[in-house]
Image (tube, rainbow, N blue to C red):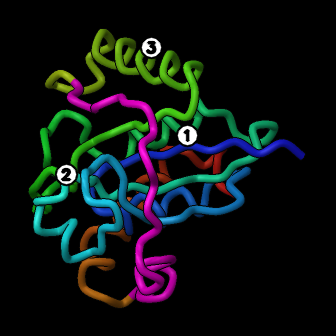
């Protein structure tokens, strides 16, 4: 069985992780950091906004069950790609909307989807999602992995993560595992 990878950032990694864990064909979702200058960042450093890293998720998926296009479609559904360095109350470059492509095909698909969404008027403002080659990926600390699954009653999970998961389930029932 072939396996492919996608790396995306769209606000807090807990949100994207919780959504993509429920996507058909996804084998693993790992929360982490990418796109910055520090050689081994930790959560506190990334949250300070001084390392240049974004909170991202790395998604291992079976392309025979879920396409990269479907992953991108979900990604653009569950976060606001029109706000620069911000998702809701989470503000800073670490929360930027970013697609880190693994190969030129992913870059092309991401650019084409952004162009289609901008032309379609799906969003009221232009998409500001950064598309860049995948730099080194740094796995986040263990207590950040499967955060929503392990802490569903936590306040942020109730107020922010849960509604994003519900939005995914409502808008993409055909893609739920």
SS at circle 1? helix
Residue, disc 2: 52
Is label 3 in a helix, a strand or a loop?
helix
Q: Is residue 27 above or below residue 112?
A: below
- The residue nearer to you, when weighing 45 against 63, is 45
Q: Position of residue 110 (x, y in %)?
A: 45, 24
Q: Which residue is mark 3?
A: 112
Residue 154, image x, y percentages: 31, 88
Q: Where 135 sits versus 137, above or below? A: above
Q: In this orientation, does residue 35 appear?
A: yes
Question: Residue at the spot x=48%, y=77% of the render?
Answer: 145
How far apart, in angstroms, are the residues tagged by discs 2 and 1? 25 Å
Residue 163, by quadrant, is bottom left
Q: Residue furthest front?
A: 39
Going from N to C along the chain, the mark reached first, 3 or 1, is 1
The answer to which quarter of the image holds residue 98 is top left
Magenta segment includes 88: no
Mark 1, residue position: 71
First in sequence: mark 2 vs mark 3: 2
Q: Alpha carbon of mark 3 to alpha carbon of mark 1: how far?
A: 14 Å
Magenta span: 127-152
Few, some or many residues within 10 Å of mark 3 (<14, 14–19, 20+): few
Q: Residue at x 21, y 66 (%)?
A: 46
Location of residue 22 with respect to 69 vertically, above or below = below
């Amino acid at each position: 069985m072939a396996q492919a990878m996608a790396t995306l950032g769209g606000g807090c990694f807990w949100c994207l992780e919780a959504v993509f864990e429920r996507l058909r064909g996804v084998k693993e979702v790992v929360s982490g950091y990418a796109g910055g200058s520090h050689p081994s960042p930790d959560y506190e450093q990334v949250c300070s906004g001084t390392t240049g890293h974004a909170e991202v998720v790395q998604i291992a998926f079976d392309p025979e069950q879920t396409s990269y296009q479907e992953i991108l479609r979900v990604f653009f559904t569950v976060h606001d790609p029109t706000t620069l360095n911000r998702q809701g109350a989470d503000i800073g470059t670490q929360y930027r909307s970013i697609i880190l492509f693994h190969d030129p095909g992913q870059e092309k698909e991401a650019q084409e989807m952004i162009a289609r969404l901008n032309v379609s008027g799906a969003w009221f403002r232009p998409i500001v999602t950064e598309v860049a080659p995948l730099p080194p990926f740094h796995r986040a600390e263990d207590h950040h992995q499967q955060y929503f699954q392990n802490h569903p009653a936590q306040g942020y999970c109730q107020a922010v993560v849960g509604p994003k998961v519900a939005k995914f389930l409502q808008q993409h029932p055909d893609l739920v595992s």
